Image: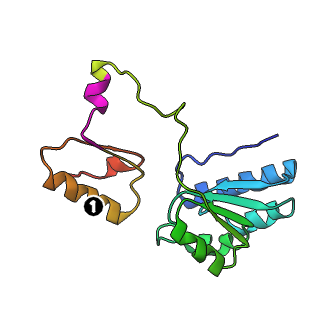
Amino acid sequence: EIRRLRRDHLTSSQSIELINQNIRNIATDFKPDITFLFHYHYIDAETLDLCHKYGPIFCFFPDDAFTPERYTLRAYNAIRRIDCVMSTKSFNISEFYAIGIPVALFVNNSYDPELLHPVDISDEEADIYGCDVSFVGNNYIRDRTDFLAALVVRCPNIKFGIWGNYWNRVRLL
């Protein structure tokens, strides 16, 4: 049986505490053979210690794990409790080993062509989603925001599609 708890982009300290409390409650009730995390930076060390009582902890990390935005004091304290990290960033593998992660695996980016393929869309959808250049990713790294804003300003004849969370906080032009 798989139990799943989603984080819907909650970042306040109360939300983070609620996430950790929910994980601790599920772990105490369910006693998982393994715990699998997608990212870990909102999970407290105490929560991982409890999960670790029941089995190993695995974490998939598709982003650079050691940026200042992600490698917070919470993350610093928690990461050493993870038994195996899988990362799409080859340059992070040696960093994971350097801080004591027992197993760090590089997993190349990939996709399923049966799920991700061109589709026919209506003219209305083309007006909404059509663009020359697309960027898909969340807006939480200042360099990313600055870079994309500079591209939009310097390339006025190119229609950009910028998709992901938190872009509504930025006015690019």
Q: Quadrant of residue 24?
A: bottom right
Considering every residue shown, the one lying at the far top of the view is: 122
Render colour scheme? rainbow
Query: What range of the chain is rendered magenta?
Result: 125-133
Q: Which residue is mark 1?
A: 147
Residue 14 x/y as whole percent: 60, 57
Q: Is residue 169 above or below residue 104?
A: above
Q: Is residue 42 above or below residue 152?
A: below
Look at the numbered disc 1 and give the secondary structure of its residue.
helix
Residue 65 visible? The answer is: no
> Relative to residue 154, is residue 54 drawn left or right?
right
Residue found 12% across the figure and 47% down from its top = 156
Residue 116 x/y as whole percent: 49, 34
Please name the amino acid that badge 1 sits on: Phe
Considering every residue shown, the one lying at the far bottom of the view is: 98
> Relative to residue 41, is residue 146 drawn left or right?
left
- Asked if residue 126 is among those painted magenta in the image, a careful observer would answer yes
Please name whichever residue, 70 or 105, is drawn nearer the observer in this view of the structure: 105
